[in-house]
Image (cartoon, grey):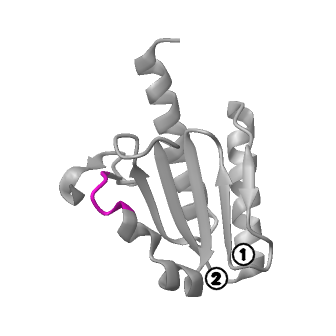
Amino acid sequence: MSNDAKEKEILEAAQLVGRTLDKKKATKVQVFYIGEKSSFADYLIIGSANNDRHLVSLVEAVNEALFPLGREENIIEGKKDSGWMLVDYGNIVVNVLTEKMRERYRLEELWVDCPEINLETDLINHQNQ
């Protein structure tokens, strides 16, 4: 597989994660391209859950969406009742937090200078840079 094809595959998987979170009623879903600023992943996705039960169902939905693509989680951090779960898929890292935890940690502020993928248009927004 060519490098361009691999990058496109990773982008499509990141978009799928964002859309899956949105479809399952996560709020404030953000998909950042962090590949130029990070050594650990190409995409970082953040979404908010209404409560701990919703958080777990969102993580399960993402796992189910990515499994047919051959992507399984490498690491899951956080407990079901912790208010925050991080799932590492290698090139893609997904953070699902309750609104309370998201307000506390404001992860998106760490990546504000990275391009954000608009899930409605599939375009990369470079305005953050």
Quarter that holds the C terminus: bottom left
- Mark 1 and mark 2 in contact (Cβ < 8 Å)? yes
> Element under label 2?
loop
Q: Amino acid at mark 2?
A: Asn
Q: Is residue 114 magenta?
A: yes
Question: Which residue lies under the disc numbered 2?
Answer: 50
Counting the numbered discs, the total is 2
Residue at the image position 57 percent from the left and 51 percent from the top: 93
In this view, the residue in front, 77 or 32, is 77
Q: Eyeballing the image, is 93 above or below 83?
A: above
Image x and y of residue 64, in percent: 75, 48
Residue at the image position 79 percent from the left and 71 percent from the top: 79
Q: Is residue 55 left or right of residue 2?
A: right
Question: Which residue lies under the disc numbered 1?
Answer: 54
Give the crowd class for mark 1: few <14, some 14-19, many >=20 residues within 10 Å: many
**Magenta span dominant secondary structure:** loop
**Span shown in magenta:** 111-115
Residue at the image position 74 percent from the left and 68 percent from the top: 78
Q: Amino acid at mark 1?
A: His
